Structure formats: structure tokens, C-alpha cells
Image (cartoon, grey):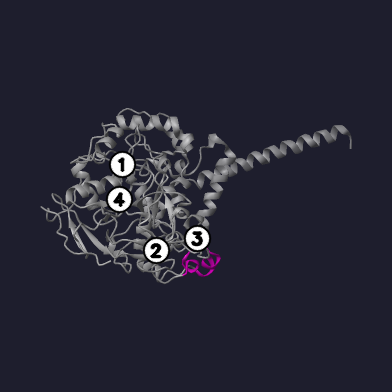
Amino acid sequence: MSDSKKHKLWIAAGLGGLVLGFSAMLALDSAVEKTSTNEYCMSCHYHEQADADWKKSVHFNSKSGVVTDCAACHLPPKEDGVLKYYMAKAKMGAKDIWTKMTKDPDEIDWKAKRELSHAETIVYNASCEKCHANLFPEGISDDGITAHLYYEENAKKLNLQCISCHLDVGHFMPGYQHKKLQGTVDTGSGEVYDSAAVVTAFENFTETVPGTRAAIRMIAVPGGEFTLGSPEKEPFRAQDEGPQRKVKISPFFMGEVEVTWQQYWSFYNETMSEGRTPPETVYANNSRPDVDAVSGPTPPFGFPDQGWGMGSRPAITMTHYAAQTFCQWLSLKTGRTYRLPTEAEWEYAARGGTQTPYFFEGDPKRLSGQTLRAKIFKADTAMIARYVVYGGNSPSQTQEPEFVQANPFGLKNMLGNVMEYCADWYAEDAYAKIADGAVDPKGPAEGTEHVVRGGSYGDDAALVRCSSRGRTHHDDWLRTDPQNPKSIWWYSDIKGIGFRVVCEVPAGVETNR
């Protein structure tokens, strides 16, 4: 064959390849378009409520009349790369089909799918920015301007996403608010107390906060000796849980449950501030020894209960300083000394006289969902579910006290539900500096983060052991707060944090220790 004919054949083959390739791309593009319609997306959805809530959202019912399609949020913009777009489409499509073929819809935690942590994995921020090129539209509030300026300046550094503040725009969420809370908060009906409780004996009592409807059930925790920390062979033990130390704890009163929203809003309603006072002025006022009225929280953005309900659920999202200030307010109102528990007091109370990983029977390796055994046989939840709100039985939110049974001391939710603040600063080697036989040991004199204990509603059984330690991550938990200076009262990105109070035994009350 002559070189001329070979050349022509090569040209023909090349043109044919181009035509086939172009045709394939057109066919692929057409297939992608057809499988990216709202109707097609909804045909694969198990959760019909998600479709209904989308049709109630501002993305569906916009003032302009423009409907934002499913693919507009859940796929990246094509302008950022066709290959990236197709890969994301294939991955999401395969996941949806596999879920429809293999998953039982009744076993899927739908509430968890509404959480920010999940939304951040299925919404593309680049798509949000593509549609909302103008972040300062007509009618935006001053708070909105401040927040969006903060976003523009810090998005990359702090890994901020639009969905972090606008969780409800794609799917309607009852109770979700994206504006500053106005006025006081309803604390329910019932008696307004005119005096604090009378405490004459070391026994359980109900504190009544004068001028409010807040009543706090306090449990008399007997003093005793116990071993702080966990043995080296305890499953899932972390390095900071040792070395173990035998210590003595004096008697004290502790809240039966975490401070509830009804109790916390009573504090808020009496002490709330406008937010114009600089934090350093608030700190200075509240630290005065002769202070007769504390300055309380500024209004939070939206409802910090996340729409889960208030009442007897634990109050959440407040800072350690806010929890301490609540204790200061409670002390002034009742004439008794209320405070956060030390870490040693907290663990002693959580154990309830036991020295096992939990205050109930259970092997962490059998209760945890992280082990190979659990992946084959599933974790053993029969016992732990009676006492703990955690990742194995929680619908990804806090629960009311009646959801669980009390520990041997009569305290509920010491493990799970919400992480609880302790008074101590956190240090990994804190126990190494405690002497055996120490009485009422305290943590380091200074630090940068505080101890949190107990784990939360979303944690595995490995993290809700009595000895498991945690700490605050103050700056990270404030990362989406647009205020300058940052709030000293509310966290923006942490929902599983709360606290319970300790009351020191009043002078003259015999404890028989």
C-alpha cells in the first residue's frame, strides 16, 4: 500500500474516531442530563420527606420564581471541570442505586441525614457560590453583611461552607432559625418560686430558684475513695486516662441531670445583655467579689436547641464561660455555692461506686461498633441502651431524662447525651501530677482548654466509658461565628456540649462522712 493511501486511511480513522468520540460524549451528556432531573432524582429517593421538604424550601419557593434543582446543589459546577462533574455524578448515582438495592429504609437514621456533618458531604460549596455570586443582595441585614464579609475573608482558612449557616435553604427544617433570637424565651407554665429550698440534711433536695420557674433536682453524692483513671488493659483506653490514682472525694450535691433548657432560659431571661458591652467589661464585672447581679448571655443566632425541643432536654451550645456564669447566677439567687464539678468529682459520680468501664455490666469491645466483631455480628446494645444516649441508640440528637435509667448514685445521663464541662483545665498528663491518697484533687492551675467528660449522643460506646476524657476546642467550635469580637457565650459549631451543676454542702449540714 502506498504511503498516500496509508495517510488517507489514518486521516479517515482519525476522523471516524473523532466522530465516535463526539457522539459518545453527546450520548453521555444526554444521559447525564436525563438522570439529573428532579423527577429522576426523586425516583431513587427512599426518604419521601426530603422531597416534600425541598418543595417547602426557599430554593423551591424563591421570590424570583426560580426553582433550584437537586443537581444544582448536589453536583459541582461543570465550569469547574467536566471530568470532576461526571465523576461526582457517577459516584452519587452508584451510591443511590446501591442504597436502594441493599438498604432497609426503616433502618436508616434519617435525622442524622439532616445534620450539618452529613450535609457538608453531599453539597458542593462551589455550586452555592456559582448561583450566589452576589453575597450582598438588596435587603440583607447588617448581621448578614457582617457574616458574609467574615465568610469572604476566612472561608479558605477556616474551611467554611455556605451550608454551615444556611442549612435550611435546600430543605425546609421546622424550628430552624437563621436570625438573632429576639426578646425573652418562654420557660413554661407553673409556679414562680419566691424562695430557695431549705437544706438541713445531707439528702436529695429540689432547688427552687427565686423569681423563676426553675427547679433543679439535686442528688446527695456520698464521699468516698475511688481509683481515678483506667487500667492499662481497658479496651479503647487513651494515654491521658492514666496513670491511675487512688483519691478521696468529699460529699457534695450534684444535679440529677444536665442543666435543662427550661432552667437555662430562666438564667438567660434574667441576665441577658444586648451584646454591645465589650467582653473584657463583662469579665471584669462578673469577677468582682461584691457583684450582686451578673451579666448574662447575648442573644444567640436562631434557636440553639436545633429544633429538637427545649423543656427538659439538656441546654447546649453554650461556652464554658457561660456555664460558669450560670453557676455564679445560681449561687447569688440561692445563697449556696454552685459550681462546675472537678474532673475527679465528675468521674467519681459517674462511676457510682463501681470501678468497671461503665457503671453497668458491659465489655467495651462488645458494645463498640468500631470492632471487627461488631461489623459481623453487630454491637451488643441491650444493656447500654438502658443507661446511655449514644451513637448506638440515638436518633442523632439529645434526649429527655426519662429516656434512660439512673446510675447507682441516682444520676442520669452521666454517660452520653451531651459532653459535660468540668471546672478543670485539660492536660494530657494531669493524673501524673496527682498524688495517691489526694483529697479532692483539682487539675492544672492554668491551661488553654477545659476538660469535658461523658461523651455525647453521637459517640461510639468506646467514648462513653467512665474514664474517657475529652477537651474543648474553643477556637474551632467558634469558627463560623461572624461576630467581632467572638461570642463569649455561644458556640456556633458544637451541639453535643452541656453541663451539670455541683452544690457544695452548706455549713452546718452533717454528712456523716
* Observer-nearest of 413 and 123: 413
How far is mark 1 from mark 2, CA to CA?
30 Å
Quarter holding residue 218: bottom left
Label whose residue precedes the other's in the sequence (4 or 1):
4
Given this view, does label 3 or label 4 mark the residue nearer the observer? 3
| Residue assigned mark 3 | 237
Find out whether the residues at labels 3 and 4 contact each other: C-beta distance under 8 Å: no
353 vs 7, left or right, is left
Given this view, does label 1 or label 3 mark the residue nearer the observer? 3
Going by the numbered disc 1, the residue's amino acid type is Trp
How far is mark 3 from mark 4, CA to CA?
35 Å
Q: Residues within 10 Å of mark 1 (few under 14, many from 20)?
A: some
Please give the label number shown on residue 489. 1
User: Could you tell me residue 317's position as x and y percent?
Assistant: 33, 47
Label whose residue precedes the other's in the sequence (3 or 4):
3
Label whose residue precedes the other's in the sequence (1 or 3):
3
Of helix, strand and loop, which one carries label 2? Answer: loop
Is 386 part of what is drawn in magenta?
no
What span is colored magenta in the figure? 363-377
Going by the numbered disc 3, the residue's amino acid type is Arg
Going by the numbered disc 4, the residue's amino acid type is Gly
Which residue appears at 29% of the width and 56% of the height?
Answer: 258
Q: Residues within 10 Å of mark 2 (few under 14, many from 20)?
A: some
How far is mark 1 from mark 3, CA to CA?
33 Å
Which residue appears at 24% of the width and 36% of the height?
Answer: 285
Of helix, strand and loop, which one carries label 3? Answer: loop
Residue at the outermost right position:
1
| Residue assigned mark 2 | 393
